Image (tube, rainbow, N blue to C red):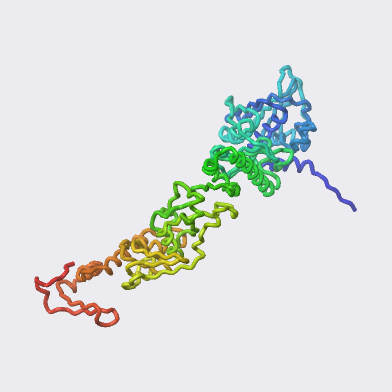
């Protein structure tokens, strides 16, 4: 017994209508056929009410009408077939999308009832008196909603001028409308070659139609690639994606990088070093070409941050600011400027940030340079150095009972921070270290709680009300602990208790002794009568 491949023609014809995933593929196939026929102008007219689509081109015309109904036989000349590898199924979309197809070319015309044609009925080709230059196709019963908006996008990269309902389409990404450079995969247009504002987004076209695009991009900030059709093939039948797209994407990305390399090397030769770095650093970094900086003395300013505010756990990082001018190589190599690497502020490195701030160190983005760059030898990685924090002239320590954070609070004259061989004493701002808040003499705000926590919950929701409450609680605690007037301190504490809410206490006088009694450290006694007017007391 032997078996062999067989094709059920009726089943193939019946199922072919489900091969195309997009109804607008009909238009792209007709445009593609016109382009392959050598058209220099294509006119598309669509009457949505009558559901009639007309496509007229000035190409070489149709010499064999049988090609229209021969599935999987491209019918194109050998050179075209070798260059573009047509599938021979394009016109079949017309048979499934329309009820009637009228095709005219030169002095002949065919009027196709699509249902009859799919039933394999014979269709007469008739002679006509009219001379039709190129090919004219008229489709009836075609539903193409929103074609007016879709056609512009469909023809973004199409090489042949197209008129839709009499209006020329812009075709902004057509090869003739772009500044391109050659590459081994085709023609490449890089965004940002003049101003350095490179793009990570790329639109890829094959035979004039988009086969790869980002989810979203600004059309004036996008790379454009027109692939060599001898090397790449689009997916049958829609031609909207490349075959082996994952593999081809890597190749395209590699070619884009090579194109940027070529562009940057030319710019480096033509521009002074400072201008080259200023304009093209972002493009160098974005395309992985930062090694071009290795032999230059100039560095980009965006690698350096000055610590200008109080470091807190906040993604906005308002406490740092990019320097206006990058330090010189001489200043870095002489030690006049110290570069340090620091992770984003957290409760585990706040002390390191405070030391760097006190010392005037610059926070350096060393990842933005090649590992062999000369500046890498002068970066100090503070995260890798041991840190020690201790109070100077400690006064007392208590626990802050906040809503969100409960750190130990140590009041002192100053905070001594040691990192490596560096030592600083900080007297104006609080320092968080290992869930302890060191509060020096000059700290009066509650802002140090923001070194303890970011106040973000497990769902990444910012707990603003808890931050406000804990910040106020710390400020109030500092004020009370530092108070030199015992009456004012006690009055401040009693006001929070709102004792007036309790009728039992109205009109009563008490004697309160602090530092005596049991565990709470105070005692309270009810007096027989209210104190006289001469007594010093605070009223609530």
Name the residue nearer the viewer: 24 or 179: 179
Task: Write the residue at 68% across / 32% down.
Answer: 30
Q: Quadrant of residue 90?
A: top right
In the rendered image, residue 40, in percent from the top left (x then y), is placed at 67, 25
Whether residue 259 can be seen here: yes
Up-down relation of residue 35 to residue 224 (above or below): above
Closer to us: 89 or 315: 315
Q: Quadrant of residue 76?
A: top right
Whether residue 155 is visible here, answered yes or no, is no
In the current view of this chain or complex, which residue is farthest to the top?
A: 129
In the displayed orientation, state which residue is furthest to the right.
Answer: 1
Q: Position of residue 331 (x, y in %)?
A: 48, 52
Residue drawn at x 60%, y 39% as measured from the top left:
269
Q: In the drawing, does residue 145 fall left or right of residue 117?
A: left
Residue 128 in the image: above or below residue 310? above
218 in relation to 464, above or below: above
Q: Position of residue 143 (x, y in %)?
A: 61, 34
User: In the picture provided, is 524 more to the left or to the right than 34?
Assistant: left
Residue 168, percent from left and from top:
59, 27
Q: Nearer the viewer, residue 66 or 437?
A: 437
């Amino acid at each position: 017994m032997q078996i062999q491949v067989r094709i059920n023609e009726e089943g193939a014809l019946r199922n072919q209508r489900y091969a195309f995933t997009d109804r607008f593929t009909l238009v792209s196939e007709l445009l593609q056929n016109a382009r392959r026929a050598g058209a220099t102008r294509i006119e598309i007219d669509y009457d949505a009410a009558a559901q009639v689509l007309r496509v007229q081109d000035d190409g070489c015309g149709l010499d064999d009408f049988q090609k229209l109904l021969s599935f999987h036989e491209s019918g194109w000349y050998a050179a075209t077939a070798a260059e573009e590898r047509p599938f021979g199924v394009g016109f079949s979309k017309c048979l499934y999308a329309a009820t009637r197809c009228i095709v005219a070319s030169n002095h002949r015309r065919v009027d196709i009832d699509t249902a009859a044609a799919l039933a394999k009925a014979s269709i007469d080709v008739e002679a006509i008196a009219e001379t039709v230059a190129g090919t004219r196709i008229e489709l009836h019963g075609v539903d193409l909603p929103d074609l007016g908006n879709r056609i512009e996008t469909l023809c973004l990269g199409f090489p042949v001028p197209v008129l839709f309902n009499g209006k020329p389409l812009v075709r902004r990404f057509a090869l003739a409308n772009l500044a391109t450079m050659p590459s081994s995969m085709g023609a490449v247009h890089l965004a940002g070659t003049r101003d350095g504002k490179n793009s990570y987004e790329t639109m890829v076209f094959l035979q004039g139609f988009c086969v790869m695009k980002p989810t979203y991009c600004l059309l004036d900030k996008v790379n454009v690639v027109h692939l060599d059709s001898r090397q790449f093939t689009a997916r049958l039948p829609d031609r909207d994606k490349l075959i082996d797209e994952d593999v081809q994407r890597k190749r395209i990305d590699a070619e884009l990088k090579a194109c940027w390399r070529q562009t940057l090397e030319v710019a480096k030769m033509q521009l002074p070093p400072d201008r080259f770095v200023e304009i093209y650093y972002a493009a160098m970094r974005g395309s992985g070409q930062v090694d071009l900086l290795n032999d230059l003395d100039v560095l980009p300013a965006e690698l350096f941050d000055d610590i200008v505010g109080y470091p807190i756990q906040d993604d906005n990082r308002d406490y740092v600011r990019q320097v206006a001018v990058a330090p010189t190589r001489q200043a870095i190599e002489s030690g006049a400027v110290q570069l340090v690497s620091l992770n984003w502020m957290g409760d585990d490195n706040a002390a390191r940030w405070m030391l760097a701030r006190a010392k005037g160190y610059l926070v350096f983005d060393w990842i933005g340079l090649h590992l062999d760059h000369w500046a890498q030898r002068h970066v100090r990685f503070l995260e890798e150095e041991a840190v020690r924090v201790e109070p100077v002239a400690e006064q007392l320590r208590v626990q802050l009972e906040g809503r969100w954070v409960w750190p130990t609070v140590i009041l002192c004259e100053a905070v001594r921070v040691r990192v490596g061989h560096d030592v600083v004493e900080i007297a104006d701002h609080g320092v968080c270290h290992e869930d302890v808040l060191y509060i020096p003499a000059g700290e009066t705000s509650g802002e140090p709680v923001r070194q303890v926590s970011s106040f973000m919950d497990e769902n990444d929701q910012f707990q603003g009300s808890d931050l406000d409450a804990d910040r106020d609680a710390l400020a109030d605690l500092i004020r009370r602990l530092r108070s030199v007037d015992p009456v004012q301190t006690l009055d401040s504490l009693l006001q929070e208790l709102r004792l007036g809410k309790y009728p039992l206490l109205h009109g009563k006088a008490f004697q309160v002794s602090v530092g005596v009694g049991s565990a709470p450290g105070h005692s309270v006694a009810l007096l027989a009568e209210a104190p006289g007017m001469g007594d010093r007391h605070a009223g609530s």
